Image (spheres, rainbow, N blue to C red):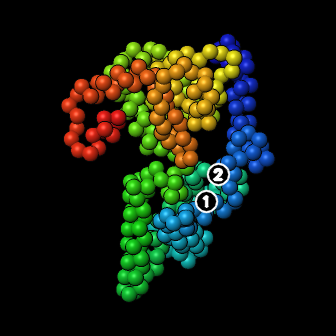
Protein backbone atom coordinates (compact mmCIF):
# COMPACT_ATOMS: atom_id res chain seq x y z
CA UNK A 1 0.00 0.00 0.00
CA UNK A 2 2.92 2.33 0.63
CA UNK A 3 5.02 1.15 -2.32
CA UNK A 4 7.81 -0.13 -0.05
CA UNK A 5 7.52 3.01 2.12
CA UNK A 6 7.94 5.36 -0.85
CA UNK A 7 4.38 6.63 -0.31
CA UNK A 8 3.47 6.34 3.40
CA UNK A 9 0.19 8.18 2.85
CA UNK A 10 -0.92 5.30 0.62
CA UNK A 11 -1.66 3.24 3.74
CA UNK A 12 -4.18 5.83 4.93
CA UNK A 13 -5.57 6.41 1.44
CA UNK A 14 -6.28 2.70 1.00
CA UNK A 15 -8.79 2.95 3.86
CA UNK A 16 -9.96 6.52 3.28
CA UNK A 17 -11.07 5.53 -0.24
CA UNK A 18 -13.97 3.57 1.28
CA UNK A 19 -15.38 6.75 2.81
CA UNK A 20 -16.37 8.00 -0.64
CA UNK A 21 -18.58 4.95 -1.17
CA UNK A 22 -20.00 5.06 2.35
CA UNK A 23 -20.91 8.71 1.77
CA UNK A 24 -22.66 7.87 -1.50
CA UNK A 25 -24.63 5.12 0.24
CA UNK A 26 -26.11 7.55 2.77
CA UNK A 27 -29.09 9.71 1.82
CA UNK A 28 -27.91 12.92 3.47
CA UNK A 29 -24.32 12.63 2.34
CA UNK A 30 -25.19 11.54 -1.18
CA UNK A 31 -27.23 14.65 -1.82
CA UNK A 32 -24.27 16.82 -0.85
CA UNK A 33 -21.84 14.93 -3.05
CA UNK A 34 -23.79 14.90 -6.27
CA UNK A 35 -25.27 11.42 -5.92
CA UNK A 36 -28.76 12.55 -4.87
CA UNK A 37 -30.00 11.96 -8.41
CA UNK A 38 -29.45 8.24 -7.75
CA UNK A 39 -31.48 8.21 -4.52
CA UNK A 40 -34.60 6.06 -4.89
CA UNK A 41 -37.27 4.67 -2.52
CA UNK A 42 -36.78 1.34 -0.77
CA UNK A 43 -39.04 -0.54 -3.20
CA UNK A 44 -37.20 0.66 -6.34
CA UNK A 45 -35.66 -2.72 -7.17
CA UNK A 46 -38.69 -4.85 -6.35
CA UNK A 47 -40.99 -2.54 -8.30
CA UNK A 48 -38.68 -2.73 -11.31
CA UNK A 49 -38.67 -6.52 -11.17
CA UNK A 50 -42.41 -6.86 -10.65
CA UNK A 51 -43.72 -4.36 -13.21
CA UNK A 52 -42.18 -1.29 -14.82
CA UNK A 53 -43.39 1.03 -17.54
CA UNK A 54 -42.40 4.54 -18.61
CA UNK A 55 -45.19 6.59 -20.16
CA UNK A 56 -46.58 5.00 -23.32
CA UNK A 57 -43.62 2.63 -23.60
CA UNK A 58 -43.77 -1.16 -23.31
CA UNK A 59 -44.08 -2.88 -19.95
CA UNK A 60 -41.26 -4.89 -18.41
CA UNK A 61 -41.43 -7.57 -15.75
CA UNK A 62 -39.32 -10.27 -14.14
CA UNK A 63 -42.44 -11.41 -12.30
CA UNK A 64 -41.99 -15.01 -13.45
CA UNK A 65 -38.70 -15.14 -11.55
CA UNK A 66 -40.28 -13.57 -8.46
CA UNK A 67 -43.16 -16.08 -8.40
CA UNK A 68 -40.87 -19.08 -8.74
CA UNK A 69 -38.48 -17.54 -6.18
CA UNK A 70 -41.35 -17.44 -3.66
CA UNK A 71 -41.94 -21.12 -4.34
CA UNK A 72 -38.23 -21.70 -3.84
CA UNK A 73 -38.34 -19.76 -0.57
CA UNK A 74 -41.15 -22.00 0.68
CA UNK A 75 -39.17 -25.06 -0.39
CA UNK A 76 -36.17 -23.74 1.54
CA UNK A 77 -38.08 -23.25 4.77
CA UNK A 78 -40.49 -26.19 4.72
CA UNK A 79 -39.45 -29.70 5.68
CA UNK A 80 -42.28 -31.07 3.52
CA UNK A 81 -40.83 -29.78 0.26
CA UNK A 82 -39.24 -32.42 -1.94
CA UNK A 83 -36.05 -31.37 -3.72
CA UNK A 84 -32.77 -32.86 -4.85
CA UNK A 85 -31.03 -29.74 -3.56
CA UNK A 86 -29.63 -30.13 -0.05
CA UNK A 87 -31.77 -28.35 2.56
CA UNK A 88 -28.74 -26.55 4.00
CA UNK A 89 -27.85 -25.13 0.58
CA UNK A 90 -31.46 -24.12 -0.05
CA UNK A 91 -31.63 -22.24 3.23
CA UNK A 92 -28.27 -20.59 2.66
CA UNK A 93 -29.44 -19.27 -0.73
CA UNK A 94 -32.76 -18.13 0.77
CA UNK A 95 -31.23 -16.24 3.70
CA UNK A 96 -28.40 -14.82 1.59
CA UNK A 97 -30.86 -13.50 -1.00
CA UNK A 98 -33.26 -12.16 1.62
CA UNK A 99 -30.57 -10.24 3.47
CA UNK A 100 -29.13 -8.87 0.25
CA UNK A 101 -32.57 -7.59 -0.78
CA UNK A 102 -33.03 -5.91 2.61
CA UNK A 103 -29.59 -4.30 2.59
CA UNK A 104 -29.75 -3.05 -0.99
CA UNK A 105 -33.29 -1.74 -0.47
CA UNK A 106 -32.22 0.14 2.66
CA UNK A 107 -29.38 1.97 0.86
CA UNK A 108 -30.79 5.16 -0.73
CA UNK A 109 -28.23 5.09 -3.56
CA UNK A 110 -29.70 2.75 -6.17
CA UNK A 111 -28.81 1.94 -9.78
CA UNK A 112 -30.12 -1.01 -11.82
CA UNK A 113 -26.78 -2.81 -11.96
CA UNK A 114 -26.60 -2.93 -8.16
CA UNK A 115 -29.62 -5.23 -8.34
CA UNK A 116 -27.35 -7.99 -9.65
CA UNK A 117 -26.15 -8.40 -6.06
CA UNK A 118 -29.33 -10.30 -5.22
CA UNK A 119 -30.95 -11.04 -8.58
CA UNK A 120 -28.74 -14.09 -9.10
CA UNK A 121 -29.97 -15.38 -5.73
CA UNK A 122 -33.57 -14.92 -6.82
CA UNK A 123 -32.83 -16.84 -10.02
CA UNK A 124 -31.34 -19.73 -8.03
CA UNK A 125 -34.39 -19.75 -5.75
CA UNK A 126 -36.61 -19.71 -8.84
CA UNK A 127 -34.81 -22.81 -10.11
CA UNK A 128 -35.40 -24.56 -6.79
CA UNK A 129 -39.03 -23.51 -6.88
CA UNK A 130 -39.50 -24.84 -10.42
CA UNK A 131 -38.00 -28.19 -9.43
CA UNK A 132 -40.23 -28.47 -6.37
CA UNK A 133 -43.33 -27.66 -8.40
CA UNK A 134 -42.35 -30.33 -10.92
CA UNK A 135 -41.92 -32.91 -8.15
CA UNK A 136 -45.12 -31.88 -6.36
CA UNK A 137 -47.20 -32.43 -9.50
CA UNK A 138 -45.92 -35.96 -10.13
CA UNK A 139 -48.78 -38.31 -11.00
CA UNK A 140 -51.21 -35.44 -11.71
CA UNK A 141 -51.05 -34.98 -15.44
CA UNK A 142 -53.48 -32.09 -15.75
CA UNK A 143 -51.79 -30.01 -13.05
CA UNK A 144 -48.31 -30.88 -14.30
CA UNK A 145 -49.32 -30.01 -17.85
CA UNK A 146 -50.66 -26.63 -16.72
CA UNK A 147 -47.47 -25.99 -14.73
CA UNK A 148 -45.36 -26.95 -17.74
CA UNK A 149 -47.29 -24.55 -19.98
CA UNK A 150 -46.95 -21.75 -17.42
CA UNK A 151 -43.19 -22.31 -17.15
CA UNK A 152 -42.82 -22.42 -20.92
CA UNK A 153 -44.79 -19.18 -21.25
CA UNK A 154 -42.75 -17.48 -18.52
CA UNK A 155 -39.45 -18.61 -20.01
CA UNK A 156 -40.53 -17.49 -23.48
CA UNK A 157 -41.49 -14.07 -22.12
CA UNK A 158 -38.10 -13.65 -20.41
CA UNK A 159 -36.27 -14.66 -23.60
CA UNK A 160 -38.35 -12.25 -25.70
CA UNK A 161 -37.82 -9.47 -23.16
CA UNK A 162 -34.05 -10.06 -23.15
CA UNK A 163 -33.95 -9.85 -26.94
CA UNK A 164 -35.95 -6.63 -26.82
CA UNK A 165 -33.77 -5.13 -24.07
CA UNK A 166 -30.53 -5.86 -25.91
CA UNK A 167 -31.88 -5.05 -29.36
CA UNK A 168 -34.39 -2.35 -30.25
CA UNK A 169 -34.44 -0.84 -26.73
CA UNK A 170 -30.71 -1.27 -26.00
CA UNK A 171 -30.21 2.50 -25.59
CA UNK A 172 -33.82 3.60 -25.03
CA UNK A 173 -34.84 5.19 -21.73
CA UNK A 174 -38.07 3.18 -21.89
CA UNK A 175 -35.88 0.22 -21.00
CA UNK A 176 -35.56 0.23 -17.17
CA UNK A 177 -32.04 -1.15 -17.35
CA UNK A 178 -30.86 1.76 -19.50
CA UNK A 179 -29.55 4.16 -16.87
CA UNK A 180 -27.24 7.11 -17.68
CA UNK A 181 -26.61 5.26 -20.94
CA UNK A 182 -24.44 6.64 -23.74
CA UNK A 183 -26.53 7.61 -26.75
CA UNK A 184 -25.90 5.87 -30.10
CA UNK A 185 -25.49 9.40 -31.45
CA UNK A 186 -22.11 9.51 -29.71
CA UNK A 187 -20.89 6.66 -31.91
CA UNK A 188 -22.05 8.64 -34.96
CA UNK A 189 -19.99 11.61 -33.76
CA UNK A 190 -16.97 9.35 -33.20
CA UNK A 191 -17.21 8.00 -36.75
CA UNK A 192 -17.48 11.52 -38.12
CA UNK A 193 -14.47 12.67 -36.11
CA UNK A 194 -12.41 9.68 -37.27
CA UNK A 195 -13.32 10.50 -40.87
CA UNK A 196 -12.19 14.10 -40.40
CA UNK A 197 -8.91 12.95 -38.83
CA UNK A 198 -8.33 10.43 -41.62
CA UNK A 199 -8.25 13.26 -44.17
CA UNK A 200 -5.91 15.44 -42.11
CA UNK A 201 -4.04 13.32 -39.51
CA UNK A 202 -2.08 16.32 -38.29
CA UNK A 203 -5.03 17.31 -36.10
CA UNK A 204 -4.32 14.22 -33.97
CA UNK A 205 -1.30 16.13 -32.61
CA UNK A 206 -3.08 19.48 -32.19
CA UNK A 207 -5.07 20.70 -29.16
CA UNK A 208 -8.65 19.51 -28.77
CA UNK A 209 -10.87 21.30 -26.24
CA UNK A 210 -13.68 19.55 -24.34
CA UNK A 211 -15.83 21.68 -22.02
CA UNK A 212 -18.84 20.10 -20.32
CA UNK A 213 -20.07 19.26 -16.85
CA UNK A 214 -20.40 15.67 -18.02
CA UNK A 215 -18.21 14.37 -20.81
CA UNK A 216 -17.61 10.68 -20.10
CA UNK A 217 -17.05 8.50 -22.22
CA UNK A 218 -15.50 11.10 -24.56
CA UNK A 219 -11.96 10.30 -23.29
CA UNK A 220 -12.36 6.85 -24.83
CA UNK A 221 -13.44 8.19 -28.20
CA UNK A 222 -10.71 10.86 -28.17
CA UNK A 223 -7.92 8.51 -27.10
CA UNK A 224 -6.10 8.84 -30.45
CA UNK A 225 -5.72 12.59 -30.00
CA UNK A 226 -2.50 13.52 -28.20
CA UNK A 227 -3.49 16.91 -26.71
CA UNK A 228 -7.00 16.86 -25.26
CA UNK A 229 -7.97 19.24 -22.48
CA UNK A 230 -11.08 18.74 -20.33
CA UNK A 231 -12.84 21.49 -18.38
CA UNK A 232 -16.16 21.65 -16.55
CA UNK A 233 -16.64 25.21 -17.81
CA UNK A 234 -15.09 27.65 -20.25
CA UNK A 235 -11.71 28.69 -18.76
CA UNK A 236 -11.58 32.30 -17.65
CA UNK A 237 -8.67 34.66 -18.09
CA UNK A 238 -6.94 32.69 -20.85
CA UNK A 239 -6.96 33.00 -24.61
CA UNK A 240 -8.49 29.93 -26.20
CA UNK A 241 -6.41 28.49 -29.04
CA UNK A 242 -7.86 28.03 -32.51
CA UNK A 243 -8.22 24.31 -31.89
CA UNK A 244 -9.27 22.16 -34.86
CA UNK A 245 -12.01 20.55 -32.75
CA UNK A 246 -13.94 21.96 -29.79
CA UNK A 247 -16.56 19.92 -27.93
CA UNK A 248 -18.78 21.68 -25.42
CA UNK A 249 -22.05 21.66 -23.56
CA UNK A 250 -24.68 23.61 -25.49
CA UNK A 251 -24.92 25.92 -22.47
CA UNK A 252 -21.43 27.20 -23.35
CA UNK A 253 -22.20 27.72 -27.03
CA UNK A 254 -22.68 31.49 -26.97
CA UNK A 255 -19.66 32.04 -24.73
CA UNK A 256 -17.48 30.04 -27.10
CA UNK A 257 -18.76 31.95 -30.10
CA UNK A 258 -17.41 35.10 -28.45
CA UNK A 259 -14.17 33.61 -27.11
CA UNK A 260 -13.02 31.49 -30.05
CA UNK A 261 -11.60 32.98 -33.25
CA UNK A 262 -14.14 33.35 -36.03
CA UNK A 263 -14.69 30.56 -38.48
CA UNK A 264 -16.09 27.34 -37.01
CA UNK A 265 -18.60 24.84 -38.39
CA UNK A 266 -20.97 23.63 -35.68
CA UNK A 267 -22.72 20.28 -35.29
CA UNK A 268 -24.59 18.65 -32.40
CA UNK A 269 -24.82 15.19 -30.90
CA UNK A 270 -26.50 13.60 -27.90
CA UNK A 271 -24.16 12.19 -25.27
CA UNK A 272 -26.94 10.82 -23.06
CA UNK A 273 -30.65 11.32 -22.64
CA UNK A 274 -31.35 15.06 -22.34
CA UNK A 275 -27.61 15.84 -22.57
CA UNK A 276 -26.77 17.62 -25.81
CA UNK A 277 -23.24 18.62 -26.78
CA UNK A 278 -22.02 20.74 -29.67
CA UNK A 279 -18.92 19.96 -31.69
CA UNK A 280 -17.17 22.81 -33.46
CA UNK A 281 -14.79 22.11 -36.33
CA UNK A 282 -12.44 24.87 -37.42
CA UNK A 283 -13.72 25.97 -40.82
CA UNK A 284 -10.58 25.04 -42.76
CA UNK A 285 -10.62 21.58 -41.18
CA UNK A 286 -14.26 21.05 -42.08
CA UNK A 287 -13.79 22.41 -45.62
CA UNK A 288 -10.96 19.98 -46.32
CA UNK A 289 -13.12 17.13 -45.05
CA UNK A 290 -16.03 18.12 -47.31
CA UNK A 291 -13.70 18.55 -50.30
CA UNK A 292 -12.36 15.03 -49.78
CA UNK A 293 -15.91 13.69 -49.78
CA UNK A 294 -16.85 15.59 -52.89
CA UNK A 295 -13.77 14.31 -54.68
CA UNK A 296 -14.87 10.74 -54.01
CA UNK A 297 -17.66 9.14 -56.00
CA UNK A 298 -20.87 10.41 -54.40
CA UNK A 299 -23.37 7.75 -53.25
CA UNK A 300 -26.62 7.53 -55.16
CA UNK A 301 -30.00 8.33 -53.70
CA UNK A 302 -31.71 11.10 -51.78
CA UNK A 303 -29.58 10.50 -48.68
CA UNK A 304 -26.29 11.18 -50.47
CA UNK A 305 -25.45 14.36 -48.58
CA UNK A 306 -26.34 12.84 -45.22
CA UNK A 307 -24.14 9.82 -45.92
CA UNK A 308 -21.30 12.10 -46.98
CA UNK A 309 -21.44 13.98 -43.70
CA UNK A 310 -21.38 10.74 -41.75
Indicate the quadrant where residue 42 lies.
Answer: bottom right
Decide which of 99, 46 is in the foreground and name it. Answer: 46
Residue sitting at x 39%, y 62%? 159
Name above or below for residue 249 compared with residue 178: above
- The local crowd at label 2, few if under 14, some if 14 to 19, many if 20 or more residues have their Cα within 10 Å, is many
Residue 132 spot, x, y in % from top left: 48, 73
Sequence-first disc among 2 and 1:
1
The answer to whether one can see residue 228 in this image is no
**Residue 303 screen position, x and y as percent:** 29, 44
Badge 1 crowding class, 10 Å Cα cut-off, few under 14, some 14 to 19, many 20 or more, is some
Task: State the residue in front, 203 or 119.
Answer: 203
Dot label at residue 110: 2
Residue at 57% over, 27% down: 257
Q: Position of residue 54 (x, y in %)?
A: 55, 62
Residue at the (59%, 27%) spot, across then down = 256
Q: Residue furthest top?
A: 6
The tag on residue 45 is: 1
Q: Residue at 47% x, 44% y: name it.
A: 183
Amino acid sequence: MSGFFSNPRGVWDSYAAFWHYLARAGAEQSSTQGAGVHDHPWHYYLAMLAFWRLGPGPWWSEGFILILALAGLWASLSERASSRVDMRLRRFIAFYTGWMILLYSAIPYKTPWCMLGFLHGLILLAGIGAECIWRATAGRRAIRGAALLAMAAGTTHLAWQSERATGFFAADIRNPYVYAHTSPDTARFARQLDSVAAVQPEILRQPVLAMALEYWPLPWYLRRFEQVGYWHSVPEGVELPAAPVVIADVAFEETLRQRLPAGYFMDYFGLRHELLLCVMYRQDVWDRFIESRQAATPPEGADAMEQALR
